[in-house]
Image: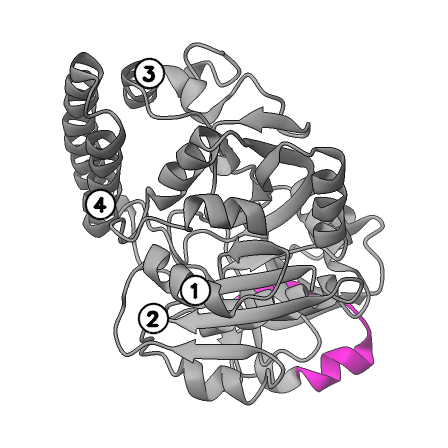
Amino acid sequence: MQLSIIIVNYNVKYFLEHCLLSVIKACKQVDAEILVVDNNSTDGSKAYLEKKFKNIRFFWNKENVGFGKANNFVLPFAKGEHILFLNPDTIVPEDCFTNCFSFFETHTDCGALGVRMIDGAGNFLKESKRSLPTPAAGFFKMIGLAEMFPSSKLFAQYYAGHLPEKENNKVDVLAGAFMMLSKKTIRLTNGFDEGFFMYGEDIDLSYRIQKAGLKNYYVGKTTIIHFKGESTQKKSSNYVEHFYGAIKRFVDKHYSNKIIKKGLMNVVIGSGKLFAKLKNYLTKQLISEKTNPSLSCVYIGSKTQLENINDIINNSKNKIIEITNSIENLSSIIEKNNADAIIFSEESLTNKIIIETVEQLPKKYLALFYQEGASSIIGSNDKNQKGIFIANY
């Protein structure tokens, strides 16, 4: 078997539904299996997903054991020569896995690879490629120089800003949202360090891969959607505590013999945590929980397909104001109808084309996604908050 795809779910059943549908399409040309481990979700994930995906193997934890431990639990059951750790709030293009295999074949020193990620609004996610934590990288990010000089090798080193986002390159750190490893790499590293409950485990694993003599590669020529706000809400105090706690654990583990570096890192971590809390407090009044809004939508698909999902549309305040089978002149169609959102149906378009189109659209429009076989429509235009979903139950 070529590939085992491991996905950890926690209370995101609608986004996972779309993730699985996209993964199944991407697996049509490869020999693969899909393993889903649920960390004791309370949103009815088991009842909703098991009956829809009978060929997927599910594991149901009775408690939330954390990201790394959940992934490691499934590893002994994985039969693939490659292992993909994939977040549930992602959509992958049809050629994603074949592109990754081709890269492994031509780069024999590759221990793990990640891909270019965009959020639901088409914005590039800089954490797709990163450098190892250093005092300078953390300091420049904290005081805003990384944002002011996003392509600087010095100031933007945290996100490896000097490396072009659409080109393939060696990097220090890959994102756990999409991390494909060879079976050899798994044997050398034993997977994630379970001491990291959430966040930081991808940095730790990326570092240990390099210490084992292998390389991490960022594949910028393949793009996926990572809605991100479903699993990471940066404006929450819980995120701040977990994130900076994870970085401190990494520093304590790997920089224990580097007294000066460890001391400087702890100063940056403490300051960064304080800055993050202050920033969140100052912007708290501007942040509100998203509810499913009333939207005027352009639907890309056939009238027949639209009739099949009318029960989903009718469960919302949304209205379809235009139907088109093509993405040609899409922006002008949206503007002419004064639309708020676009519903992409993969009946008419491939996920690859949808991902490319979302990138090109003005960010003021909300992109919504429907895939054949789904009982929901999903979308998100804010990577820091939960997205919206429309479901018929």
Residue 104 falls in image quadrant:
top right
Q: Name the residue rendered at 35%, 45% in the picture.
A: 201
First of labels 1, 4 by sequence position:
1
Q: Is residue 388 left or right of residue 225?
A: left
Instruction: Provide the residue designation for mark 4.
Output: 284
Q: Residues within 10 Å of mark 3 (few under 14, many from 20)?
A: many
Q: Which mark is residue 8?
A: 1
| Residue range corresponding to the magenta coloring | 295-309
First of labels 4, 3 by sequence position:
3
Query: Could you tell me the amino acid type at mark 2?
Result: Asn
Mark 2 secondary-structure assignment = loop
Q: Is residue 297 magenta?
A: yes
Query: Could you tell me the amino acid type at mark 1?
Result: Val
| C-alpha separation, residue under disc 2 versus residue under disc 3 | 36 Å
Cβ atoms at labels 1 and 2 below 8 Å apart: yes
Q: Which mark is residue 140?
A: 3
Which numbered mark, 2 or 3, is in the foreground of this view?
Answer: 2
Residue 242 location in percent, x, y? 23, 47
| C-alpha separation, residue under disc 3 versus residue under disc 1 | 33 Å
Q: Which mark is residue 52?
A: none
